[in-house]
Each structure stands twice: as structure tokens, then as C-alpha cells.
Image (cartoon, grey):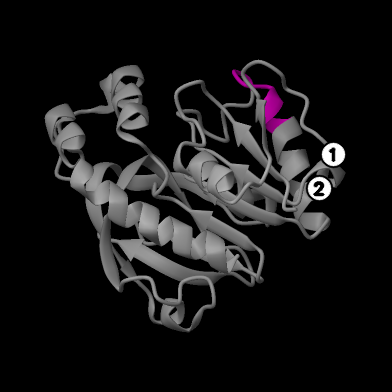
Amino acid sequence: MTRIHCFQHVPFETPARIAGWAEEHRYPLAVTRFYEDPHPPSPDTYDWLFIMGGPMSLLDDKAHPWLASEMGAVEAALGAGKTVIGVCLGAQMIAHVLGARVYDNPVKEIGWFPLTLTGAASRHPLTEGVPESFTAFHWHSQTFDLPSGAVHLARSEACAHQMFGHGSNVLGIQFHLEMTPEVIAALADHNSAEIVAAPTVQSRDEILAENTHLQSGYDILDSILGRL
């Protein structure tokens, strides 16, 4: 039986659809909530690791001293050959641990925006069958360089590096396929100061009105997780 563990950084960014997928497949899921307990488990206790998003930056180690501990745990998971999936901040963390640079994106990308798969994605086992273009939810101001050996899988107009694979068991996803309407609303409430007038930042009303894309995102997520 696949044992799943999740690293969560704030109360309002939960595993969401990931937890639902695990429940449907009867995979046990445990969560380390770093805002409550900064002590990550040994990789021996799980088979898959999900690293969720959060409003902090990897550079916020003074405000969040547990970031160093978490990155050590991610490095241990990668070294142990675990399946590791990072979402948003989690993708940046994987990239950083694999030696790539994390830095400010030229613009913030907040709201529902289209993505396009790369040519390599059509040949990659994790993204086979995923539509060449689709709309997903975004909330980020930083990006990353591709780690050495990574395969670039998706881009958006505002951010070149939106998804990468590393080997057959590591995936970084800058955008969000996992969010529910409740999580999106909570994100908009807690991070409302980031919603400013800009071409790549939607209004709160636009963000909350575009839930028609959620199901297609779940279908893509389920397909990727099934292939993992």
C-alpha cells in the first residue's frame, strides 16, 4: 500500500484534491504542518511526499526557521528515491534542493491563466494524454531555473518554467491543479494585499468566478498521479 505524506505550510493551503485522490485509492495520508510542528518525519515512514504551497518565500528563513529543516527533509526524500511532488512553493523547494536558482518572476501571476505543454511533455510518461493547452489556477510571484537533468513540461505566458519532471519519480508544478473553491476563497482572503491591478493579476471576483476549470484540473491531476 502506498503511504503518502504531505508537507503543509499554512492552515489554508491544504492537500485538497490530493487528499480526495488518496482517499479514493485507499492510500493512507499523513500531514506535517510546519506552522505547528517543525519536525519532519523520516523518509522511511512514507512512499510519496507532496510539498504544498504557501505565501512565504524560500528566502524567508528568518521568519520561518523551519524552512531549513524542511529542505533537509526534501533532500532526504529525494536521496531515498521517494516519489516527490511539489506544488508552487513545493516546486520551488524541489528545484532549490536539486541545485537550481529560485528568484522573483518578472510579474506576479494570480488567477486563472492558460498553460501550454512543451514538445518534451508529449513524450514524457507523466504527461502523456494531458491536453496541449489548458487553464489552471496560479498564485505566485517567484519562479525557478530548471534543475540539471530536469525535463521542461509546461509554460505560461507570464512564467516560462511552470512544470518539470526529474527522473521518473519527481515532479514540480508551479501552478495549482489541487485547489477546491473553499481553498481558493481562503487564499484570496489571507493574501488579499497581493491582488492588485495588473495584466497578470485577476480581481477577487474573477478568481472566485472561474471555478468551471476545477474539474478539468482534477482530471489532469488524477491522470498524472495515476502515471506516477
Residue 6 in the image: above or below residue 172: above
Q: Does the magenta stretch include residue 65?
A: yes
Query: Residue 180 location in percent, x, y?
Result: 35, 36
Q: What residue type is labelled 2?
A: Ala
Q: Which mark is residue 166?
A: none
How many other residues sit within 10 Å of disc 1, few (<14), some (14-19) or many (≥20)? Answer: few
The image quadrant that residue 178 belongs to is: top left
Query: Residue 9 location in percent, x, y?
Result: 56, 27
Instruction: State the residue at coordinates (61%, 45%).
Output: 50
From the viewer's perspective, tell me whether residue 205 is left or right of residue 156. left
Q: Which of 84 and 93 is in front in this view?
A: 84
Q: Are marks 2 and 1 in contact (CB under 8 Å)?
A: yes
The image quadrant that residue 134 belongs to is: bottom left
Instruction: State the residue at coordinates (57%, 42%).
Output: 23
Residue 62 in the image: above or below residue 91: above
Helix, strand, or loop for circle 1? loop
Query: Residue 69 location in percent, x, y?
Result: 75, 31
Query: Residue 147 location in percent, x, y?
Result: 60, 63
Q: How many labels does the image show?
A: 2
The residue tagged 2 is: 76
- Which region shows up in magenta? 62-68
Quadrant for the C terminus, please. Answer: bottom right
Q: Does the magenta stretch include residue 142?
A: no
Mark 2–mark 1 distance (CA, rounded to whole Å): 8 Å
Helix, strand, or loop for circle 2? helix
Residue 172 in the image: above or below residue 42: below
Instruction: State the residue at coordinates (66%, 47%).
Output: 27
The image quadrant that residue 199 belongs to is: top left
Residue 97 at least partly seen = yes
From the viewer's perspective, tell me whether residue 107 is left or right of residue 87. left
Q: Residue 42 carries which label?
A: 1
